[in-house]
Image (cartoon, rainbow, N blue to C red):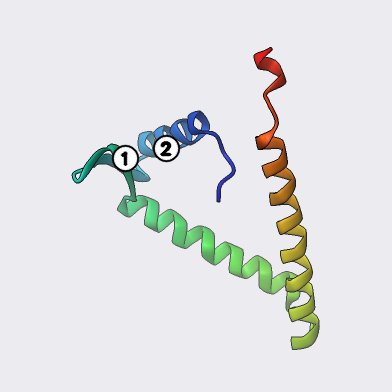
Amino acid sequence: MLLLDRNRVTTLVDRLRAGGLVDRFEDPSDRRHIVVRLAPPGKQALDTAFAAYQEGLQAMLGGLDAAQSDAAIALLRTVLLGVQHGAQLDADRPDSSAY
């Protein structure tokens, strides 16, 4: 779940499309839906980002034994879930700027 409103997703997709990273088209079976698919440059960028992520993770956790690494990952997942839950709570609140 991205926890982004529709306008922010549209803006993000438009920027990715302008950068040639994704293709966007109507779903042929339901024109109300928009399909977004990685373009070849987007796949290459994702592969590059994932490789950098793996290198960073290895740099952070490389000195830990298996049990310590598992514990660190479990803790980070817990933190992430807490952040996502907090973001969802914020997303569920009425936008005070709309009043």
**Amino acid type, label 2:** Val
Question: In the rendered structure, which disc, 1 or 2, sits on the residue that comes first in sequence?
Answer: 2
CA distance for labels 1 and 2 = 11 Å
Q: On screen, 94 above or below 63?
A: above
Mark 2 nearby-residue class (10 Å; few <14, some 14–19, many ≥20):
some
Mark 1 near mark 2, Cβ–Cβ under 8 Å?
yes
**Amino acid type, label 1:** Ile
Image coordinates for residue 48, horizontal then vertical, percent:
48, 60
- Number of numbered discs visible in the structure rendering: 2
Mark drawn on residue 34 = 1
Image coordinates for residue 25, horizontal then vertical, percent:
26, 40
The reply to whether residue 65 is in sight is no
Side of 83 where 23 appears, left or right: left
Image coordinates for residue 1, horizontal then vertical, percent:
55, 51
Side of 49 where 32 appears, left or right: left
- Label 1 vs label 2, nearer the camera: 1
Q: Residue at x 79, y 69 (%)?
A: 75
Mark 1 nearby-residue class (10 Å; few <14, some 14–19, many ≥20):
few
Residue 86 lies in quadrant = top right
Q: Residue at x 72, y 19 (%)?
A: 96
Mark drawn on residue 98 = none
The residue positioned farthest toward the left in the image shown: 28
- Dot 1: element: strand
Q: On screen, 42 above or below 26?
A: below
The reply to whether residue 35 is in sight is yes
Image coordinates for residue 99, horizontal then vertical, percent:
69, 12
11 or 62, which is in the foreground? 11
Q: Residue at x 34, y 41 (%)?
A: 20
Side of 44 where 64 appears, left or right: right
Mark drawn on residue 13 = 2
- Dot 2: element: helix
